[in-house]
Amino acid sequence: MTSPERIGSYRIERLLGVGSFATVWLGHDPVLGSSVAIKVLAENWHHDLRVRERFLDEARLLRRLDDERLVRVHAVGELADGRPYSVMGLADGGSLRDRLAAGPLPVPVALDLLAEIAAGVAVLHRHGVVHRDLTPGNILFRSHPDGERVLVADLGLAKALAAASGLTARAGTPGYMAPEQDDPLAVVDTRADVYGLGRLGVRLLGAETRRDTPAPPRPDGTVRLRAEVPPQVADVLRRATAIRPADRHHDAGAFRAALRHAVTSAHRSAPGAGAGWRGPAGARPVGWRFAATVVGGAVLVAVGTLAGDTATVRDARLGTSGPLTVALPPGWRAVGTGWAGQYGADGDLEPALVMSPDPRRWAVDATVPGAFVGLSASTAARTTPAGFVAERPHAACAAAPVRRTRQAGVDWVVARFTCDRGRPVVVEAAGLGPGRTGLVYVQVVPPMGSDAGFVDRLLAGVRVR
């Protein structure tokens, strides 16, 4: 395939991927100085009006929805030969299919990822759209200053719910496609996507981790999952993949709520919290936190992923988020209003913020120092500060002995990691807030050349009202 030099005003740098209906190129916008993905209808479908209209429908739909959980379309155009193209935001983190090809994801990461995918599909359902083709290849990742974002992509088969029944052509990917999608006369609604979410869950959490498609269910509807997966989660997946649509969760939002409730129930019944699921010997309770950011040879668990992008700032030296107040080191700023994936008893996100000289770059740029600070009552209910810090190993880094320090009335457990690549130092710290208001978690990347007391001074500036 010959690479075009330009598509519209965009300089083409390389091929990103080839699908059955389209080719995707990496383009560069010379005016804005940014990279984009340009999706072009394949030549062999150029004269098929149905496929052409489906291609344009996808672009129109994504443009209309314009949500951060979906791939965004910036513009559409037409090549000299008449083929349409759409200019989209670049998903620079690749696809879930790529990541699964490299090996299974840890169960806590897989659970959080499944919840984030469901949140993206819920956006479609709230707008009366059913995706119909949820597969690992259609789940993409995009870098973000606060951590990776999960994007739902490829809405070429999506249909408005009002038009998703009656003489609907067979559509979907075997292994993920709901049974009713094989029947041209069946009603295809949000429950078809719930089935797809369930099958994605089986692929993420299944015992047969090297399969390209999830293992088929047993005659009783169950599937073989990894030993660390709580039975409460298995029950959610079994319901989501029921043969009859009426037996499934009614939409992606309901599926996500059921998944979250299952994980919370597993926490409460985990070792140390009473009888219930215990998993394999030595297994820790599954966490409800999202994704991982690769930092050199280490992995920073991105419980520091934030929802929202603006913290309340009382003055140049303080940042606040709910009851959290932090004293900012000179030249640092704070952003963030909630701890993504961490919910309080009221159903709202628990408070958190990121502080750094450049808060929007610190999570993705190893040269930028910064810190994540979060307060979680739900985490305090399931584990201790020492247990929480132990959940955050950085395997490719050298760990110093865990130490304890008392700062501003909080007894902190502190673990320091020295790394050969990426960020040279990562510090994990946790303590209980005054009056046991919750577990306070701080992840610090100190400035280069900072003295040994930098972390303790930062911890001393954390207050819980």
Image (cartoon, rainbow, N blue to C red):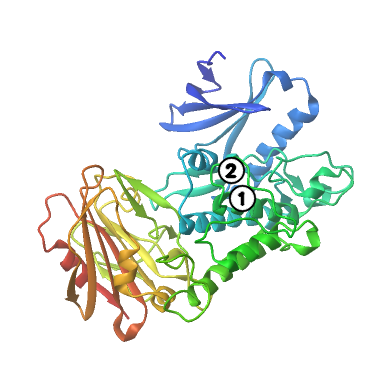
Question: In the rendering, at what x and y percent does residue 65 appear?
Answer: 64, 48
Task: Check the picture and name the quadrant holding the N terminus.
Answer: top right
The answer to which of 163 and 315 lies nearer the viewer is 163
Residue 313 visible to an observer of this rendering: no
Amino acid bearing label 2: Pro
Q: Which mark is residue 53?
A: none
Residue 103 lies, with reference to residue 443, above or below; the image says above
Residue 33 horizontal side relative to residue 50, left or right: left
Marks 2/1: CA distance? Answer: 7 Å
Residue on which disc 1 sits: 200
Residue 394 horizontal side relative to residue 310, left or right: left
Amino acid bearing label 1: Leu
Q: Which mark is residue 136?
A: 2
Residue located 69% across and 59% down the image:
240
Secondary structure category for the residue under label 1: helix
Residue located 33% across and 48% down the image:
361
Dividing the picture into quadrants, the one containing residue 210 is top right
